[in-house]
Image: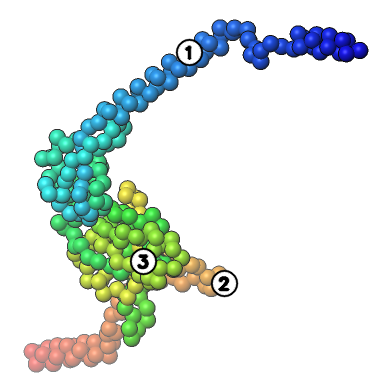
Amino acid sequence: MSDVREQLSAAGREMSPRSGLRVRPQRPVRAIFGALLVVGSVVAALAVFTRVGDRREVLAVNRLVLAGEQLSDADLKVVSISSDEGFPSLPATDRELVVGQYARVRLAADGLLVSDSIQPEPLVDSERVLMSVPVPLSGVPVGLREGSRVALIVTADSTGGSPPAPVLVEANVAAVPTNLGELVGGNGESGTAAVALSVEVPPGDAALVGSAAEVAVAVLDPSAPFPAQPAELAEPEPSTPSEEPPAVSGLPEVVDVETEPSTPPTSTAAGDRRGRDRNGDGDGNGGDGG
């Protein structure tokens, strides 16, 4: 009995695998795909490295520059950025051309200069007046920014009288608070009731805007005509009188009759008396002659 068991156990050991490794069949397609993947990764890495290494020097500002300020050489600095042809930055070689130009918008410190952020002429027109106007937050539209063309809705002081009609004044926004967007969109959480806007107005309207009781702002399209004044819209059009009054039925027609001038009446008696006097004189003279 024991001999049978030993033979069975020996046969089982011979049937068990000699090793745990299994050799899979070779697949050349997978090997080629893997090689191509490795080559593509290497090429992409080289392209990114080359792109990052291609840098150029451009101009930036080293302080906060407000709209309308003139740039000096001390306000500029040179920084190196990755090359990007789509970004309209100003190269460092244009430094002499940039010095003396004026900022069209507010330039943040360490911000890059772009071609649309500066201009050669002053931001404020020499024929206009730059003044600060307090505007309630409820009168500031969302999207107002520096350079916007606006209409100031000016309400004059009505102390001791009836409130006058508002007046529209055309203006250009020269500067706005840096946190204007937060103030307008903050739903009154900031605790600020009004903001000060730097606007450019005609000299003749400076006194009106400066003494106004309240000012609101309306943003206009740069190419749109300026709206009419509210007083002009309220005036009625003058009525033209009709040439002839309307005829009334049932009345007799009046006809103008031209009358000849009356001649003074002649006295018949006076004529007869003068005739008799002449006859009498004639008779008397004839008798004397006989």
Nearest-to-viewer mark from 3 and 1? 1
| Residue that appears at 30% across and 61% down | 177
Cβ–Cβ under 8 Å for marks 3 and 1: no
Q: Residue furthest front?
A: 2
In this rendering, the answer to whether 256 lies above or below 24 is: below
Q: Which residue is mark 2?
A: 250
Residue at disc 3, secondary structure: strand
Query: Which quadrant of the figure has residue 26?
Result: top right
Labels 2 and 3: the sequence-earlier one: 3
What amino acid type should be assigned to the residue bearing mark 1? Ala
The residue lying toward the viewer, choosing from 32 and 284, is 32
Q: Please tell me the numbered disc located at residue 94.
A: none
Mark 2 and mark 3: span between their CA atoms?
Answer: 61 Å
What amino acid type should be assigned to the residue bearing mark 3? Ala
The residue lying toward the viewer, choosing from 258 and 223, is 223
Q: Residue furthest left?
A: 289
* Residue 80: x %, y % from top left: 23, 36
In this rendering, the answer to whether 203 lies above or below 71 is: below
| Residue that appears at 14% across and 91% down | 281
Packing grade of label 3 (10 A; few <14, some 14-19, many >=20) is many
Query: Which quadrant of the figure has residue 170?
Result: bottom left
Q: Please tell me the numbered disc located at residue 35.
A: 1
* Residue 155: x %, y % from top left: 34, 72
Packing grade of label 1 (10 A; few <14, some 14-19, many >=20) is few
What amino acid type should be assigned to the residue bearing mark 2? Gly
Labels 3 and 1: the sequence-earlier one: 1
Residue at disc 2, secondary structure: loop
